[in-house]
Amino acid sequence: MTNKHETMNQMIARLKVGEHFPEVKLAGCLIGKTCIPDVVKPLRENVHVRHVDLSSNGLSEFGATQIANVLKTSLSLRTLSICDNSIKSAGAEQIAEALEVNSHLHTLHLSCNRIDDVGCKRLALALRKNSTVHTLHLDKNNAGDEFGQEMGTTLTMNHTLKFLDLADNEITANGAMALARAMTSNISITSLNLSRNSIGNEGTTEVAKMLRQNSVLQQLRLSWNTISDLGAHELAVVLHENSVLELLDIADNRVSSVGATELARALHVNHSVQSLFLSGNGIAGPGAQEVALALQVNNTLAELYLAWNCIVEHGAKALADALCVNTSLTVLDMSANGIGKEGASHVARALTHNSTLRVLHLHGNVLKDEGPKHIAKALQTNRTLELLDLDGNEIGPVNVKDIADALKVNVNLQTLKLARNKINDIGAWELSEALKVNRTLTKLDLTRNSVEEAGATELNEALRVNNTLRELHLSYNRVKETGAVALAGAIALNTTLHTLRIADNEINENGAAKLAEALQMNSTIHTLDLLGNSLSKKIEEMLDHTMRNTNAYVTVPSEFQEALCMGLHPRLGSKEDCWVRILDESLVMMVIESSTVAAPRTFSF
């Protein structure tokens, strides 16, 4: 395994000499209380550090105190992540004290730290003085209603915080009420996550009342909160009026077809919601049919998640009919709904007519024989779908041939997920033949498919000629030594693959050695997963040396370069102060002319 302390020591040494290091990633490096003083000293002195991740390091309260001392004086740190460190209330109090004087930090990750009500309340108090933190993650901290009430008071005073994550805590209806009442007049929070609490219908009702008056909240997550049709009703009523909310997540609750019907009818008039998460409820076929009717008139909704709802064939047909006329939906998740081959035929029909859907999840739908054939036929003519998820559908080697044949003519699909489909070596051969001619697929997932040596050898032949595939997932198969040697031959020559996952493949010493040697010649693979194979210490050291002493050079897609220089890429934002907008002309030209970027390597073994 990688010597994590050595990684830490190398980072410390570079920071001590003042190297320009804007991002320090030391998550999971076993720092502990012993080494944290050695880490924080250069962090305090190096003025170039902007983002620090010290998650999962066993820092405890002592480590939190050390980090708090850095925060009190730092003028450069913008993002701090110390998740999963058991800093508890005492550590949170130290961080809170630092926040009261720090005026530069804007993002703080404190997830999974066993902070509880006392520490979380102290953080809430600190935010009444702090005016720079705009993103706070306090999920998984056992915070309850006392904190909810304290945070509610804070939200009436703080006008900087925009993103607040309180998921997976112990907030009940009372805490939700306090937060909701404060949010009524709050003018800064745009995203609130209350998932995995216990707010129930009572808390949801208060949240719905808040949505009638709040004019800034854009994202609301309430999954796993025992919300039933009553709560869904309250949310549906307010959706008739609210024109700001863009994302609503009430997945994994207890909403039946009754509640789904009310929400769907609200979508007939609502023109703001773009993403709706309803997975893991019980809306069944009738609920799906009502949602489908909404899709025929709604032209705003772009993402719809309906997995695990038992919508079966009838629901699938209704949604397919809607897709034939809908022009706004780009993402649809119908996974684990028992739609069967009949439902698949309806979905396939929709794919021949729809020209906007880009992502389709159908995993776990028992499509079996005829279902994949219908989907494959649609892929031959569809020109918009970019991701197709068919995991766990018992497709088998015979039916995967139809999908492979479709790949030979499809010119748009970029990601194909076929995990857990028993395609074996025959199916791997069919897909390999398709990869030799396909020029658009960038990710192929064949996890858990009984692919053995012969199948891996065929994939090796494909990788020698394919120049578009970037990710190949082959974990939990049985490629063994022969397959590993074959893949190593492809790795040595391939110049586009950047992620290879072959965990748990019964690869022995010789096979692993060939892979390690190939990686020394390869300059593009930055992510490798070899966990669960039989690697000697010598092979591990070879892989570790390659990972730490070489970079992977990844080609930047031309369309991203263009978007980067125009400042239009959604991940960069389009605000006037976006850094791309202030680049001088020479730097813009440099970005355009550069086709590759160096990326650190991450090997798991």
Image (cartoon, grey):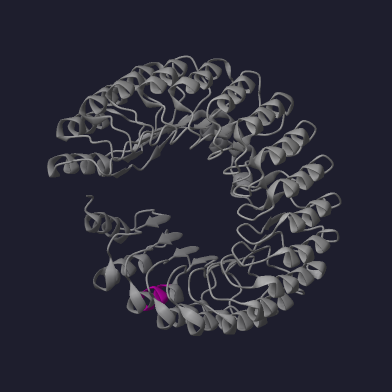
Picture layout, residue 247 above or below residue 105: above
Residue 215 visible in the snapshot: no
Residue at point 49%, 76% (across, down): 142
Quadrant of the drawing holding the C terminus: top left
Q: Residue 476: horizontal and vertical position, in percent?
A: 33, 38
* Residue 555: % across, % down: 45, 30
Q: Observer-nearest residue: 266 or 386?
A: 266
Q: How many marks?
A: 0
Residue 67 magenta-highlighted: yes
Q: Nearer the viewer, residue 10 or 167?
A: 167
Prevailing secondary structure class for the magenta stretch in the rendered image: helix
Residue at x 57% of width, y 36% of height:
588
364 and 419: which is toward the camera: 364
Residue 231 found in image quarter: bottom right
Q: Is 289 inside the magenta-drawn segment?
A: no
Magenta segment? 65-70
- Residue 272 visible to an observer of this rendering: yes
Query: What residue appears at the point 34 percent right and 18 percent down from the top-left corner?
Result: 458
Q: Is residue 143 left or right of residue 162?
A: left
Task: Give x and y (percent) for residue 478.
Answer: 28, 32
Q: Give the left or right position of residue 461, taking residue 110 as reference.
A: left
Give the percent coordinates (x, y) of residue 42. Answer: 32, 65
Q: Quadrant of residue 203?
A: bottom right
Q: Nearer the viewer, residue 210 or 227?
A: 227
Q: Residue at x 56, y 38 (%)?
A: 365
